[in-house]
Image (cartoon, rainbow, N blue to C red):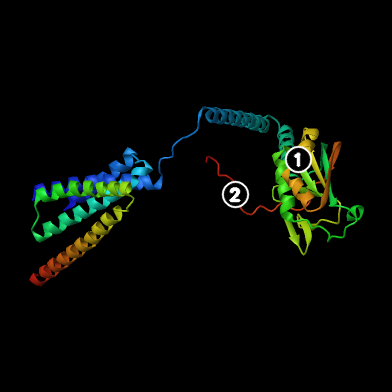
Amino acid sequence: MKERQWMFATIALILGGMLAIQFETTNNPIVRDTRDLYELRADLEKEKQRQQELNEELERYNALLDNYKGNGKEEKIVAMEEALADLKKQAGLTTVSGQGIVITIEPFNDELIGVDRPKPKIEPDMLRRLVNELNRYDAKEISIGDQRIISKTPVREVNGVIYINNEPISSFPIEIKVLAKNNEKLQQKIIASPAVEEFVRENFNVESTPKSKVILPAYEKPVRVKFMKPVKEGT
Amino acid sequence: MWLPVLGLLLGLLLGFMSDIRVPPEYANYLSIAVLAALDTLFGGIRASLQGSFEDKVFITGFFFNILLAAGLAYLGVHLGIDLYLAAIFAFGVRLFNNIAVIRRLLISKWTDSRKKA
């Protein structure tokens, strides 16, 4: 009888091992790394860059921390005010200016070619795509028709009118102001961008001009944070 | 009674700790082998409850069933027929039968012991 127990135990052990392996295999299967040498190098480069960025960030925060810790109440307050101003600038709550480009969008003048077509209409998707593309081309700050684009800006259409930041965008031409470090390059890229082509296809005339000074308005409404929570200390 | 349960737990623990994973191509075979092993185990429990347990049959059945099931699946892959379905069907049905028989045996044992008491 005892022998039989041991036999069952051995078989159960093997079965348990098989079950566990099967469970592991189905839940997190082996993913083969199929990158070749060049892809590996590119990935390595990317990670290095990331590391550098993180290090820089760390340094910045350490400097900030030192400032906070610095002697004297005055200094602390100054440091905090600086940090607050910096954060406000990052969040788009201040007016900013600098070199950039101005893009104007207006319907193509049909009278010039003598045809009678219905007025073209802007879809919010087109604007969203344009904003995404501008961001991809290293745009620093964007505003559309005097509405600053921040990370939470909605672009919607209500009854045929485009609303940005819940404010209707008044009539044509729509002016998009973009801040960029290298405005000439951004303009070149924007001329050839698919988002602008989309506008042209919908019979809009898109013009972009680089300017040495562009002024972008601040985001004026309160920023409501719904889903973010502060990170607990020590995690 | 507790030894097999302990063995099962130990096996699970070892399997999880060892972090062995099967390549996805072979995951099918392993799943069928697991099914065959389960079937053999429950068959063994039933046989021992019915008093017709033979250790040679049990041990050879365990390994032979696993190999047969995996071999059938392998053959099926190469013939383009889903032969592993046959193994799943056979083992599945037997598993249910065995468990049903075990349940009945346990219930009758239990009622007998209550009558005596």
Q: Indicate whether A190 appears above or below A201.
A: above
Asked if residue B64 lies left or right of residue A155, the reply is left
Percent x, y of residue A63: 66, 29
Chain label for disc 2: A
Q: Which residue is mark 1?
A: A192
C-alpha separation, residue under disc 2 versus residue under disc 1: 40 Å
Q: Is residue A84 left or right of residue B48?
A: right
Left or right, residue A138 beside residue B17: right
Q: Residues within 10 Å of mark 1 (few under 14, many from 20)?
A: few
Considering the numbered disc 2 on the image, is that residue within a helix, a strand or a loop? Answer: loop
- The secondary element bearing badge 1 is classed as loop
Residue at 57%, 29% (x, y): give it. Answer: A42
Give whichever of A221, A44 is nearer the camera.
A44
Give the camera-side residue of A55 and B72.
B72
Q: Nearer the viewer, residue A104 or B6?
A: A104
Return the residue at label 2.
Answer: A229
Rendered view: B48 above or below B103: above
Provide residue A124's location: percent of width, then percent of height: 73, 55
The percent position of residue A58, horizontal first and vertical second, equals 61, 31
Where residue A99 sits in the image (x, y, percent)?
Answer: 82, 35
